[in-house]
Amino acid sequence: MAPTRSGRPDIETARAASLAARVGLSFSAAQVRQLAGFAHLLQKWNAVHSLTAIRSAAAIETHHLLDSLALVPVLRPFCDQPGARLLDVGSGGGLPGIPIAIACPALRVTLLDANRKKCAFLTQARIELQLANVSIVHARVEQWRAPPFDVIVSRAFSSLRDFVTLTHHLMADDGRWLAMKGPAVERETDDLPPGAALVARLPLEIPGLDASRNVVVLRKRGGG
C-alpha cells in the first residue's frame, strides 16, 4: 500500500483494490488509482450537482462501483476484442461506463446522456482520470447517429422494450445489448420488441448489496 505525501497509507486506493478483488477482478496500480479517483469525484460532484441519490462513500462503493464492476466478467469477450466499441446509454454519473472503461482499457467506451450537467461531470472525470478510451456525447439517443456498436449497456435507463427500440439503429448486427435490471426482469423479457431476442438472463452477485440484480443479454434478431 503506497504512502501518501504525508506518510499515511492511501486508504481510498487500498479500498478500491479491495473492491475489485471482491468481484473477482485484478487491477494494476494505475487502474486502482483511477477507480479510487472516480469514487472521490462522484462523491464530490454529487454533493453539489445531485448526480445520483446515493451520497455516502460506503453506498457509492456497493451501489455504484461494485454494481458496475460486476458486469465486467460478462463483458470479457468484448474487453478482449481489439477495437471493440461499447455505448453506455443514459450514463448519468458514468455508471456503469466509467468503471467498465477502467477495467477494460482496450475497450472504446462512449458515454451518452441527454443531461448537459451530467455530461460536464463525465468530461471532467475523463480528463482527471486520464481515460483515453472514453468519449462523451451529449444527445438524445434516439436522435444520435454513429457507426454501430459491438455492445450497448444500460443501468436503470428504461424498460427493455424502450432500451432496444431507442438504440436499435446503433447496434451492430452481431452485437449485444446488456441491461442491468432488478427483480422484475422476467416481466420485461416477456415483452421484447420484434428486433431483439433473449440470449441469457444472469444473476449478478454484488458483495454487500442486499438486493436482487440481473443482467439481461439480448441480440438482434437475425444476428449471431
Image: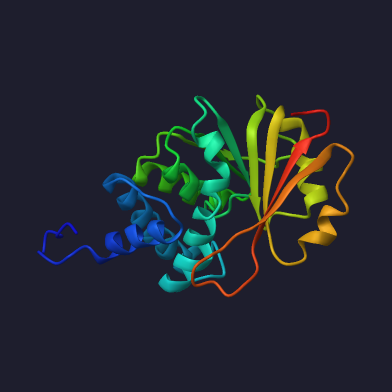
Residue 222 % position (x, y):
83, 28
**In this picture, residue 148 sits left or right of residue 24:** right
Please name the residue shown 45% across and 40% down the image.
104
Q: From the viewer's perspective, tell me whether residue 87 is left or right of residue 14.
A: right
Quadrant of residue 36 within the rendered picture: bottom left
Query: Where is 117 relative to 152, above or below?
Result: below
Q: Is residue 185 visible?
A: yes
Residue 167 versus residue 122 in the image, above or below: above
* Residue 207 vertical position relative to residue 28 in the rendered view, above or below: below
Residue 143 rendering spot, x and y as whole percentages: 74, 36
- Residue 136 visible here: no
Q: In front: 4, or 125?
A: 4
In percent of the image, x 58 and y 38: which residue is there? 137
Position of residue 32 measured from the top left corner of the image (x, y, whole percent): 32, 52
Residue appearing at x 43%, y 45% in the figure: 103
Quarter of the picture holding the N terminus = bottom left
